[in-house]
Image: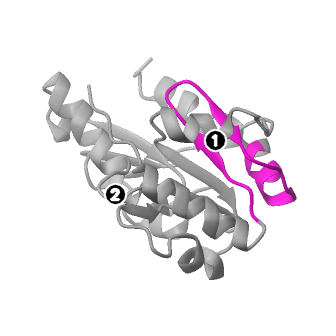
Amino acid sequence: MYSNPLKTNDIKTIIRNAAGINRPIAVATDEKVITNGSEKDLVDYFAIAKMTVDVSEDFDRTVEEDNVYQIMMGGYKEEYHIIVKDTEKAKIAAWWNRAIDIIPKNGGKGIGVNKVLEYYGIDKSQAMAFGDGNNDIEMFEQVGHPIAMGNASDDLKSISEQICGHVAEDGIYYFCKENNLI
């Protein structure tokens, strides 16, 4: 439907920049998520999604040969400028104060939602999205029914149509059941 990987030169620059501040990174392809090392912030970041850090001997080959759609790493806002220094088409789309997500400058959840709506011929007014972090703001702007999770940031709640339950309490499931969506 749509593919928008990071540029290989930007990936290599980010790897060097991260190494300069002793931060390993994870890369996400369409088939796997692997890392070139491990540290506490990255382990804790992966644990949120009930994932484990997979330090791979295949890391360099993957960066060279596969499409990388996202880079994930532990880090703080003060490190953002260091991480993307000298990149051309990469941006940070962070959602947690101890993690950094890097995606293409011309990418993000808003673009992804638009591509899906366009592909299926669905009008924005008929679309719903759920989110909990500020990285969901651009996605919320692309749908007619933005629903913030109970644990969402105040910024996201302020632009949502409704607020459902907390993500850890199956908020989306119960919202959909209560509103006869499933």
Residue 159 pos. (x, y %): 36, 63
Decide which of tag 2 and tag 1 comes sooner along the chain. 1
Quick check: 166 above or below 91?
above
Image position of 99 (left or right of 41): left
Residue 35, by quadrant, is: top right
The answer to which of 148 and 87 lies nearer the viewer is 87
Looking at the rendered structure, the number of numbered marks drawn on it comes to 2
**Mark 2: secondary structure:** helix
Q: Residue at x 68, y 73 (%)?
A: 76
Residue indicated by mark 2: 138
Quick check: 99 above or below 80?
above
Image marks 2 and 1: residues in contact by CB distance under 8 Å: no
* Cα separation between marks 2 and 1: 32 Å
Residue 44 pos. (x, y %): 81, 52
- Specify the farthest residue to the bottom: 78
Q: Residues within 10 Å of mark 2 (few under 14, many from 20)?
A: some
Q: Residue at x 78, y 35 (%)?
A: 54
Quadrant containing the N terminus is top left
Specify whether residue 11 is painted magenta.
Answer: no
Query: Which amino acid, mark 2?
Result: Glu
Q: Residues within 10 Å of mark 1 (few under 14, many from 20)?
A: few
Residue indicated by mark 1: 60
Residue 94 pos. (x, y %): 55, 62
Residue 95 in view (yes/no) = no
Q: Residue at x 39, y 59 (%)?
A: 137
**Mark 1: secondary structure:** helix
Residue 86, by quadrant, is: bottom left
Quadrant containing the C terminus is top left
> Residue 77's mark?
none
Image position of 89 (left or right of 78): left
Between circles 2 and 1, the one closer to the viewer is 1
**Stretch in magenta:** 23-46
